Amino acid sequence: MMKICQVVPYFPYKEHLQGHPVENGYHIGGVERHVYNLSTELAKLNHEVTIITARSPNHEYLSDITDFKVIRIPIDLRVYSSPVSFGLLNLTLKEFDIIHAHTPVPFAADLVAIKNLKEKKPFVLTYHNDISKDSGLGKLISTVYNSVFGRLLLNHSDIIIATTKSYAIHSRQLRKYLYKVRVVPNGVDTKRFHPKLDRNKIRKKHGISEDAKVILFVGNLEAYKGCEYLLSAFSIVAKEINDAYLILVGKGSLESRLKQIIMKFDMKNKVFFAGYVRDNELPYYYAACDVFVLPSISEYEGFGIVQLEAMACGKPVIATNIPGVREVDKKELATIHVPPKDKRALAEALLTILKDEKLAIKMGNNGRKLVEEFYSWPKIARTILQLYEKALAL
């Protein structure tokens, strides 16, 4: 049995898993759920897992997860929305066999790495994606962070896990540390996400007929996700397929802008904002769709776990061919890759799948086989355990 410490800036409360947004500044996305699923699997294998993370300001009103020990440190300040908890420097790491930290949100992994300079525990880092902003103060802060804290963190790490080889090679920060990099992809719960779910449950909820064509997006409604281009592409699709609909699952700062675009294209009755959905309801959204789309346009998207969830449910996928994202299905067995920001290419890919049911079924079946072979959580957890053992032997 190993005593494993997982370090992550945020970590879900039970309310997050039930689909309730706790607050705008306490973000639970793909990385946080990755750590939750990995920790759950490690605990099933009888390892002792402890989570070190930031505490929500609403902590006293929330219910904590009890499957493993969770230590939540109060947030002292925020730097460009990233939480800084100086209490991390007061923790003792002596009881742990290994430290496994996760980026990209800064400072949690960095402060624990600084603490570990003295205690010298084996340190594994999963580098989910680069920290980068396009302009202004955000660009300045990310540049300073990468040249100081980010460099210290990468230097301190015994093993760096990247979720794809292509992202590691193209990453501006990781390319100098490829000798430390090992590739382990994200995983998906193939029992929770599967092809036999009721496809009409969500359709009935939104008043969509059984025969209609449904396109699905799941993710934060932020600029890097490319939803503006998805809406432009959908406007083309809707002109050719009268009973086509688009469902957007998630919330974010771009929501009002997206609603303006919908009004511009007169698609108010064609596009549904589902907002946050409960964890037990999310698989049914995948079941309801005919095709899933990940239109991300930025290196801030390092993998796209939602692709795996769609494939696990037997759905064809359209994704942009950016590093990391495109490596999930390199042979395009279940995916059509399109250039980012290309609304016409995206529209053509959507029409190709929506007009060819046999192709959609074939791609969906291929996707299910792909996740069963390469992306199940038990397989991912065992691979990471092997890296822990290597780190312990260094």
Image (cartoon, helix red, strand yellow):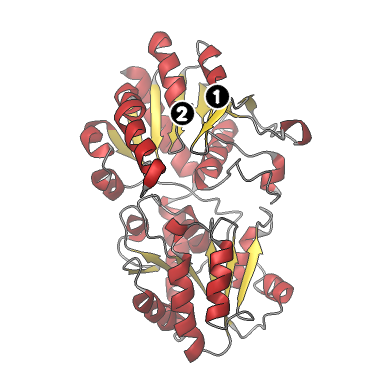
Which quadrant holds residue 16?
top right
Circles 1, 2 touching at the beta carbon (< 8 Å) = yes
Give the x, y percent position of residue 69: 64, 25
Instruction: Determine whether 154 is above or below 381 in the image.
Output: above
Tag count: 2
Report the residue at 40% width, 35% height from top: 126
Residue 377 in view, yes or no: yes
Height in image: 301 above or below 173? below
Q: Residue 107 bears which disc, if any?
A: 2
| Amino acid at pointer 1 | Ser
Residue 177 position in % (x across, y down): 24, 33
In which quadrant of the rendered image does the C terminus lie? top left
What amino acid type is highlighted by mark number 2?
A: Phe
Whether 205 is drawn above or below 219: the answer is below
Q: Quadrant of residue 319?
A: bottom left
Point out residue 113 in the picture as x, y percentages from the top left corner. 41, 20
Q: Residues within 10 Å of mark 1 (few under 14, many from 20)?
A: many
Distance of mark 1 from mark 2, alpha carbons? Answer: 8 Å
How far across and down, in percent of the image, does residue 91 sit? 55, 14
Q: Residues within 10 Å of mark 2 (few under 14, many from 20)?
A: many
On screen, residue 57 versus residue 244, left or right, reads right
Residue 265 lies left or right of residue 363; in this view the side is: right
> Which residue is found at the position 67% from the left and 80% from the top?
208
Identity of the residue drawn at 27% across and 31% down: 180
Query: Earlier along the polypeptide chain: callout 1 or callout 2?
Result: 1
Instruction: Compare residues 314 and 253 and report the one nearer the observer.
Output: 253
Is residue 37 found left or right of 240 in the rendered image? right
Provide the residue designation for mark 1. Answer: 85
Q: Secondary structure at mark 2?
A: loop
Instruction: Answer whether residue 129 is visible to the viewer in this image.
Output: no
Say which residue appears at 56% left-offset and 28% top-offset. 77
Q: Nearer the viewer, residue 361 or 268?
A: 268
